[in-house]
Image (cartoon, rainbow, N blue to C red):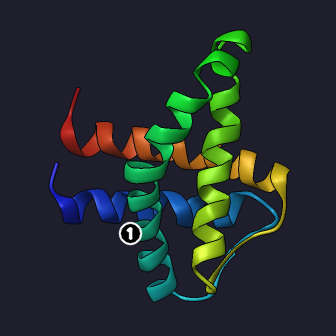
Amino acid sequence: MGFLAHLLITAFALWAATQLVAGISVRSFGSLLLAALIFGLVNAVVRPVLVLLSLPLTILTLGLFLLVINAAMLGLTAALLPGFRVEGFWPAVLGSIVVSLVSWAAARIFTGP
């Protein structure tokens, strides 16, 4: 899948999270696209390090700690971009679930099985 397609799918998933989860907001369409770019970079650079460092805890919780890591990546994106807000831990967890599900579904629709 191309970079632009991946960026647009992520932006759509983040927009869906702003619509479905109270406590997540975005200021403008430009902020949404920038949030998608930053979220992709954070997931590509920071997330693998955190997953590796927290592997024992992830195994102990049978993978549920990955939800906390995903929420932290969404929170880090919000901390780096003033036009994107996540107001707490639970909105970040719910938002990360929405983003994951919507991104997965959109990627399946556009790229096939």
Q: Estimate the x, y position of residue 96 in percent, counting from the top left.
A: 63, 47
User: Which residue lies at the image location 70% right of the left edge and 23% below the top edge?
Assistant: 64
- Residue type for callout 1: Leu
Give the SS element for disc 1. helix
Residue at 71 percent of width and 58 percent of height: 20
Residue beneath disc 1: 37
User: Considering depth in this image, is 23 or 69 the residue closer to the camera?
Assistant: 69
Can residue 11 be seen here? Answer: yes
Nearer-the-camera pick, 2 or 70: 70
Residue 15: quarter of image: bottom right
Q: Which one is nearer the viewer's eye here, 38 or 102? A: 38
Dot 1: few (<14), some (14–19), or many (≥20) neighbours within 10 Å? many
Q: Position of residue 68 (x, y in %)?
A: 71, 39
Quadrant containing the C terminus in the rendered view = top left
- Residue with the most extreme left position: 2
Quick check: can you spot residue 63?
no
Q: Position of residue 74 (x, y in %)?
A: 61, 57
Residue 55 placement: quadrant? top right
Give the number of callouts. 1
Indicate left or right for 41 with 6 as reference. right
Q: Residue at x 43, y 78 (%)?
A: 34
Q: Is residue 84 above or below residue 73?
A: below
Left/right placement of residue 27 relative to residue 6 reads right
Say if 79 sits above or below 72 in the image: below
Residue at 23% over, 60% down = 5
Q: Is residue 48 left or right of residue 77?
A: left
Residue 4, how many percent across, how many down?
21, 66
